[in-house]
Image (cartoon, rainbow, N blue to C red):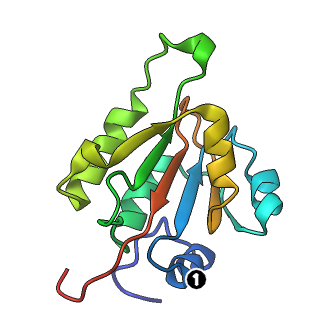
Amino acid sequence: MLKNIPSAISPELLKVLCEMGHGDTLVIADGNFPGASVAKANGAALVRCDGQGVPELLRAILTLFSLDTHVDAPVGLMGVASGQAQVEVPIWDTYSGIVSEFDERGRGTFRIIERFAFYEEAKRAFAIIATSESARYANIILQKGVVINDE
């Protein structure tokens, strides 16, 4: 057993996070996201985190790695489909609070990615984490930064 590893991080996920380098991206996908087929499209790792929600994993992951500071928006959110423009996405406020705990840019790290463009970007990710998250538009892409020893 290791100390200070969040319980939401499985050994498989810890291995994937360790293998990622700066600039690599990670998708934390909701329960409706086609994680297996997107991962298969580029040979990315697929990490199953059944029973977990995205917010818990987002917080746990951000305790272990920094967001990329060399890009304006290292956090990508799947945008609301054009026919549903009036849909509110309260989970984004949850993400904002979590990201703000770890990155002073807070919501400034976010960029909204059109739904189909999100799928294309996800196909280039290092890994896809499949969760049981049921919130709408809960998919998120994180771009890993450099870990500095004094953090």
Question: In the image, is residue 2 above or below residue 89?
Answer: below
Name the side, left or right, on which 86 lies relative to 59.
right
Which residue is more in the foreground, 117 or 92? Answer: 117
Asked whether, in this view, residue 100 is left or right of residue 26, the answer is left
- Residue 12 lies, in percent from the top left, at 63, 77
* Secondary structure type for disc 1: helix
Does residue 125 sit above or below 87 in this rendering?
below
Classify 10 Å Cα crowding around label 1: few (below 14), some (14-19), many (20 and above).
Answer: few
* Percent of width and height locating residue 67: 35, 64
Q: Amino acid at mark 1?
A: Lys
In the figure, is residue 44 to the left or right of 92? Answer: right
Image height of 2 relative to 51, above or below = below
> Which residue in the structure is indicated by mark 1?
15
Q: Residue at x 56, y 53 (%)?
A: 28
Of residues 12 and 86, the one nearer the viewer is 86
Q: Position of residue 15 (x, y in %)?
A: 58, 82
* Residue lying at 79% horizontally and 55% vertically, measured from the top left: 36
Q: Residue at x 35, y 60 (%)?
A: 71
Please state the horizontal and vertical placement of residue 11, each as a whole percent of the image. Answer: 58, 80
Residue ID at (52%, 70%): 24
